[in-house]
Amino acid sequence: MEAKTMDNIPPFFLCPISLQVMEDPVTISTGVSYDRRSIARWLANHPTCPVTNQRLTDLTLTPNATLLRLIQSWFAGTEVISLAFPVLTNPGLDVSEILCNLRETGGEVKALRKIKQLMHDHGSEAAARMEEAGVTSLVASLITRHCSGGEVSEAAMKNFVDPVDEAAVALHLLKPSPEKLKELAERNNGELIASLSSLLQQGSYEGRVHSALLLRSIFEVVSDKFKGAGLPSDLIEGVVEILKDQNASRGTTMALLAVLIGVLPHGKNRTRALEAGAVAVAVELLMEESRDRRKCEAMLRVLELVCGRAEGRAELVGHPAGVAAVVAKVLSMSTGVTERAVKVLGLVSRCCGRAVVEEMMLVGGVAKLCIVVQVEGSRKSMELAREMLRMHMKEWSKFPCFPATCLP
């Protein structure tokens, strides 16, 4: 058996402060592990993480039982370490160099590229290994460290935009577990969410795409407070700006729409979306899309959410193609698309006056509603269509083009 010397001790067994093997490893809120005695002495005078330099608002020291067991097993020369941490038997998954580079100024990009290579070669096995070793937390810290406060300074843009963009890509590829992603996203009052929001507007194309994908996953796991009052003020604006780019990939568009759907029901986000021009963007995307069912359902869901407010309904009916774009999707693709479109029409027809009722007739909406109540499909769509026909029958029946089959 190989002798246990300081030369071959796994680097992640060493405390980053004392550089000695940890006797009582604990993890702080940044996800980095230290020996309890060393970090306690440090925190007595420095309210920051020694590795990431992040200011700590949570000084809890969480025992890292898994790491302690690995250290004890390694020194005992047993095979437990192989069972608990099987990837150590794969020399291609040694992450010690990555950990060292992430902690050294100037070594970040090299580490991030190595992460991408490992993910390409080993997939989920590498992701699990790096999450356990603390790599995932360090990558997230790299993003927040250079986007402090949700704003990317001019100096940071000049010196750090490449590492930050690379870190966003790497963190998305690492696919943190839901529990880990929630922990990372909610840490320091949502600092990671604020940083990714800034990257949506100021990062490279690749960085913006992966920031959008990360935010979609984040809003699936974080608590509601991070979707409402705690949401960065520039997030919705950044999402809408990217959606305006008709050349955005399908995956990016779907991720951004999912972000909007996740946050719009909370706080003042619908007002923010309206101010950012979300209605016009959704209408234009809807007019352009004729094949993708899921995209249409998502765009109509966004319109449904903003039309829950009077200002949103006014924006939709005020758009020259707003009502017509929604009517065009009724009976065009799927039951789901039809149901979403009918819901939007129901919201505006109930609240937006005679002009909208007349426009629905002129653009063919009434004829489609008549078909919806007669064909087999969503019960919800049939009920909503029937309700609209009853509500506006007197007005619509005056038009010579009103379908005679719909008369009572």
Image: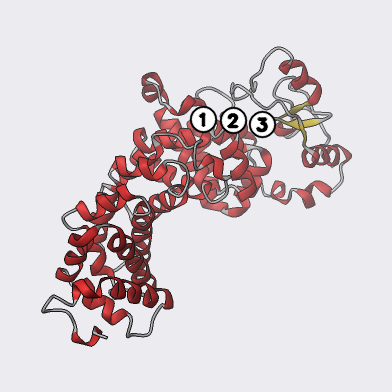
User: What is the CA distance from the residue labelled 3 to the residue labelled 2?
Assistant: 8 Å
Q: Name the N-terminal-most of marks 3 and 1.
A: 3
Q: Which residue is at a point 29% across and 53% down the rendered structure image? A: 313
User: Where is mark 1, residue-wise?
Assistant: 144
Q: Which residue is at a point 84% across and 49% down the rendered structure image? A: 79
Task: Kindly indicate the quadrant of the structure image that contains residue 283.
Answer: bottom left
Task: Kindly indicate the quadrant of the structure image that contains residue 316.
Answer: bottom left
Q: Measured along the vertical axis of the image, is residue 149 above or below residue 271?
A: above
Q: Nearer the viewer, residue 160 or 121?
A: 160
Mark on residue 225? none
Q: Nearer the viewer, residue 117 or 180?
A: 180
Q: Name the N-terminal-most of marks 3 and 2.
A: 3
Label 1 neighbourhood size at 10 Å, few (<14), some (14-19), many (20+)? many
Q: Measured along the vertical axis of the image, is residue 35 above or below residue 232?
A: above
The three-letter code of the residue at mark 2 reads: Asn
- Residue 165 visible in the current orientation: yes
Mark on residue 188? 2
Q: Secondary structure at mark 3?
A: loop
Contact flag, marks 1 and 2 (Cβ < 8 Å): yes
User: Where is mark 3, residue-wise?
Assistant: 29
User: What is the CA distance from the residue labelled 1 to the residue labelled 2?
Assistant: 10 Å
Q: Secondary structure at mark 1?
A: helix
Q: Given the current orientation, which residue lies at the most extreme right position?
A: 76
Q: Which residue is at a point 17% across and 79% down the rendered structure image? A: 402
